[in-house]
Amino acid sequence: MSKEKINLNISGMTCVNCSNGIENFLKRKEGVLDTKVSFASNEGEFTIDTDLFSKDNLIANIEKLGYKVEEDFSKLEEEQIKSFEKLKKLFFTSMIFTLGIFALVFLNLFDDKTTKMIIFLLASIVQFYGGARFYLLAYKSLSNRNYDMNVLVALGTSAAYFYSTFVLFLPNLFPEHLRFIYFDGAAVIITFVLLGRYLEARSKQKASDFLKKLMNLAPQKANKILEDGQIKTVLANSLEVGNYILVKSGEKIPADGKIIEGKADIDTSMITGEAMPVFKQIEDEVLSGTLNTNGVIKVKVLKQSKDTTLSKIITLLKSAQSKQIPISRFADKIANIFVPTVILISIITFIIWTLLGELQNAILTSISVLIISCPCALGLATPIAIVSSVSRGAKEGLLIKNPEILEIIKDIKYAVFDKTGTLTKGEISVENTDIDPKYFSSILSIESLSEHPISKAIVNYIKQKKQFSTVDVDNIDIIAGKGIKAKINDNEFLLGNEKLLLENSVKIEDKHKEFFLKELDKANGAILVSINNKTVGSFSLIDKLKDDAISLIENIKNEGIEPILLTGDNKVTASKIAEQLKINKVYSEVIPTQKYEIISNLQKDGKVMFVGDGINDAPSIKKADIGITLNSGSDITKDAGDIILINNELLSISKSINLSKQSIKIIKQNLFWAFAYNAVGIPLAAGLFYSLLGHMLTPMYAGIAMSFSSVSVVLNSLRLKIKKI
């Protein structure tokens, strides 16, 4: 046996049952060892025995089912957009014509005959234009021996539509009291089920946007140093291992490499989550996509573009996007049993009444069975509840991009949090200082000339104290990774880390050392200031916890969920933050690939929620069962997340858990009553109690019962908009 794993991009899938159908069909083929098809990412992963089954056979069989295999990702993306736009057009067209039908029913604009003819024309458009996809998908489902909601929709709406058509054009076939039309019912069913599909497709369409943005994050051009020392601008993806590149201040690093000349402060927040730029010098490694905030460096390329850390992040994101979410699709599961049962009951009903010599009753009862079992309530049970949930979530500051996650939030075992910008404010600020305010004017004047985040924090702190005037700075030297050296009126100022002072033979005086060491012990940063080789004190730098962080962690624990801190920050800082939040499990000094692996390992033991805000968090957000990000986060992260906290309030996460519980409760109630109504209604429609009641449930009453079940489902779902969460 010769095994081969093949990955294919598949377009044309319109619902989860399409992916199920492809899997079921191919599993029956000799030589196909394993199949995994993801509707979410339009990807298929297949393992075949090449001695029995080839890649060409695989593609041919998929296309035989009516789908396309796209070798080019851009082509797949193009097909996805076309499919989404078509579905959008179908939904809105059906909605407009359905509203038109109801306007004609209630407004009495024309005489009865004209009104019925116009309704027939509008209903026909909805039935065969808006509903065409259900006929096609029902055919595919039946071909693969899969009885899903598409079969139920096609069957139920067809029964209502064609019964009404015969009543309209051949009224003499029916007694006077049976001449009723149900065009409006058929149109409503198609429109609302299309609404559910539209919401699902929109979520899926947006799910891949983050990948496109991330792919464009790395710089496209690079300053390549030629053998003769000349600089040539080239495409970053053309760089080879061993090439040398020049990275100027303010430029992004185009490839993973090692510094061979120069030094600089590198903003690595997209990779490590560190709030402060990291000082890098000769022999230090730098990563593609990170930003050189100051300094000029020469870098030796160590990896090709396809092997960089950023490329690995993109690969991880693609892998995570194609994950199969274990969502219980109640309606489709039960429909596989319900649909053939309804058809069988309808046929048996027709046969029994025919054998009893009641042909008219045979026709009416068999049609009544199909009408009363029409899946309006079943089709509405989930989408209307989801619409209500999403609407309520928005009101509470939760943008639920992927409604499917409402089904699994309640099952979360681990809540994993990034630190910087998520649990903390992600802004460097000065907490305290032991420097005499008489020096503030000079310090303000010097720090105002630097764009470094620490300089900005010191400037903001001094300005908040009171009005200080600036003075002229004679000379200023910004030293990457260390601080600033400047002169004011022949006085030499040093503002920076301990290393800068030691290099300039400045010793921290005892009266300032206690404050300095105390702040370091608290895991705070500390910037020292000296004048003419004598220290005057230091500024304590912190990244404060968000106001609601402690309350959130407490709520999470009360829900039986274990909170975990996962950060790229150093061990001391991470431990201090975890201690304040009373989080027991901490992972520190981790990069995105390690975060991804940690999430994967946690998922072996239960469902995982990940909350983050930076680009470096995107793979973890997408890999986790639930990805939550803040509105203040990066665009890429927001695209990757399932939920965006619009108001940036962490306590909204607790609300999302409560909303999930309420939503699933409502959906289960809806499904219960939808099937309970069928359990009672179908026997009545079949005439089972005719001998006891003396009359049977006609198509008119079957239609009323069908509508009543739908109204009850809608009203029950709307409770989500007013329930306390």
Image (cartoon, rainbow, N blue to C red):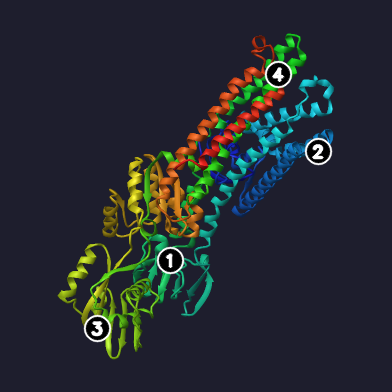
Q: Which-is-in-front pick, marks 3 and 2?
A: 2
Q: Quadrant of residue 193?
A: top right
| Nearer to the camera, 239 or 583 | 583
Q: Quadrant of residue 38?
A: top right
Q: Secondary structure at mark 2?
A: helix
Measured along the vertical axis of the image, is residue 564 above or below residue 452? above
In terms of sequence position, does the residue under pointer 1 or pointer 4 come before the other? 1
In terms of sequence position, does the residue under pointer 4 or pointer 2 come before the other? 2
In terms of sequence position, does the residue under pointer 3 or pointer 2 come before the other? 2
Tell which residue pokes out farthest to the left in this image. 510
Q: Which-is-in-front pick, marks 3 and 4?
A: 4
Q: Are marks 3 and 4 in contact (CB under 8 Å)?
A: no
Q: Which-is-in-front pick, marks 1 and 2?
A: 2
Which residue is located at x 84 percent, y 28 percent? 169
Q: Which mark is residue 365?
A: 4
Q: Which mark is residue 118?
A: 2
Q: Secondary structure at mark 4?
A: helix
Q: Are marks 1 and 2 in contact (CB under 8 Å)?
A: no
